[in-house]
Amino acid sequence: MLKQAQPWLTDYNLSMALPVVAIVGRPNVGKSSLLNMLAGERISIVDPMAGVTRDRVSAIIEIDDHYFELLDTGGYGIEDHDNLTEHVEQQIRFALSAADLVLFVVDIREEITPLDREVAELLRGISRPVQLVANKADTEQHAHIGGALVALGFGEPICVSALHARGRRTLLETIQQRLGERMTTDAPDPVMKICIVGRRNVGKSTFINSLAGQERVIVSEVPGTTRDAIDVRFELDGRTFVAIDTAGVAKSKRRANNSIEFYGYNRALASIRRADVVLFLIDSTVPISDVDKKLARYVVDEYKPCILVVNKWDLAKGQASSESYGDYLARMLPQISYAPVAFTTALTGRNVQGTIELAQSLFNQARKRVTTGQLNRAIETTLAERQPMATKHGAQPKIYYATQVSVSPPTIVLFVNNPALMKEQYRRFAEKRIRESLPFDEVPVRLVWRARKSIEPGTRRRTKGTGESPVPVDIE
């Protein structure tokens, strides 16, 4: 249990411009549901089983063009079945020490419990302002009994129903009033979102903590310690980043043992989709598994820049060189062979910062645009090396020209005579050659085949006999 004496409550601050509001309470009072309600989206996992939330899950909340960071914490007093109670409580301590305001959440449908009183005693020993929130006030009748909670010593509660979004505006306005001038109108704009993915126990949380310079997420040998996608903001050389820690992937979504694994798996995939760069952590001490291969395929299918981060390299470098291990990865994960490889020891911080610098390079590559001339010279080189094969009926695919239409990922439209004639094998070849010929050599490129009509709308044709070709004016 947390002690009343609080030597850890120094001005521990995450050096963020945003004020921090921490949600605290015993298990199953609806803390995660409250965070989701205030954020207006499902950020924190909600499950009837006590102890689902272990780490600090955060979200940036906006009200009337003002912003604050909201932290969800694990249930105070939970007896964690993986013996992580002390780790959960340490995360609560960190949240309280960073908070400008604490939301003390109780269940209005139940009488004050001994654990509620312990939380109240804890909060009376800190120097942070506390707002009592009575959750699960699903009807007006529930709201009328909230007065009994005054006995906790924090005044009249604000009655809300996180399930039905009742009282959301009132609570947000109260938070805004109590934070006052500490709220900022500057919305945080991270330079880059970095998603940390991998199977269980590869060192994702240790990597995150090394970046943050503190124990921002729980690290344990227990498989499945991280259950949610945790956003951690950090600064490096004056640049702000968001690192997303994810649950360790153990199996496919279809075979997940319970709802927590199901949500954790889904959150990991959703985190890949919203990331700018994926750090795919691999444990150097164990062989590449089917889980690694499936995860690599998903990263490729989402066209995400990726670094293969070989972690725990201090334990394996005596058995293999970085060159031979890189060759091993190329054989085992050929679909993502373009991804650069970084060798790290997250526990000591070795090459962690260098990996972020490499991620910045990939981020910049994925945002590049090339001229039509550069692109079509790359197409000419590709065609000179290999033409697309004719079908068995003799139909010959033809590529006329190309143009880049988007970035992140670089997206290239190639105009052809018939998209149905273009085979997947040739697409992979063309993608590789185009990537190598242009400044996209370490990031995925998306190719789109599009039919070029014989005479496009808006095409003008020279007078017969001039010998000049049709000139496209506006090709959609």
Image (cartoon, helix red, strand yellow):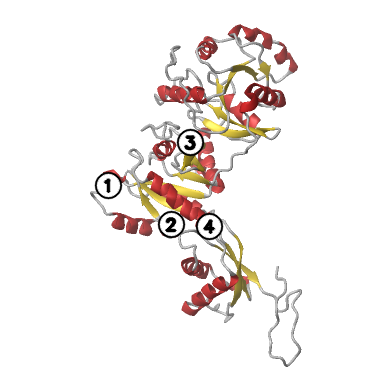
Q: Nearer the viewer, residue 468 or 9?
A: 9
Residue farthest bottom in this picture: 465
Q: CA distance from mark 3 to mark 2?
A: 32 Å
Mark 3 neighbour density, 10 Å: few (under 14) some (14–19) many (20 or more): few
Image quadrant for the N terminus? Answer: top left
Residue drawn 38% across and 54% down? 341
Q: Are marks 4 and 2 in contact (CB under 8 Å)?
A: no
Q: CA distance from mark 3 to mark 1?
A: 32 Å
N-term mark: 4 or 2: 2
Q: Which residue is mark 2?
A: 339
Q: Which residue is mark 4?
A: 366
Image quadrant for the C terminus? Answer: bottom right
Up-down relation of residue 54 to residue 76 (above or below): below
- The residue type indicated by label 4 comes to Ala
Q: Are marks 4 and 1 in contact (CB under 8 Å)?
A: no
Percent of width and height locating residue 160: 68, 21
Q: Which residue is mark 3?
A: 257
Up-down relation of residue 102 to residue 288 (above or below): above
Mark 2 neighbour density, 10 Å: few (under 14) some (14–19) many (20 or more): many
User: Where, by quadrant of the figure, is residue 216 drawn?
Assistant: top left
N-term mark: 1 or 2: 1
Q: CA distance from mark 4 to mark 1?
A: 32 Å
Residue drawn 47% across and 66% down? 432
Percent of width and height locating residue 465: 73, 93
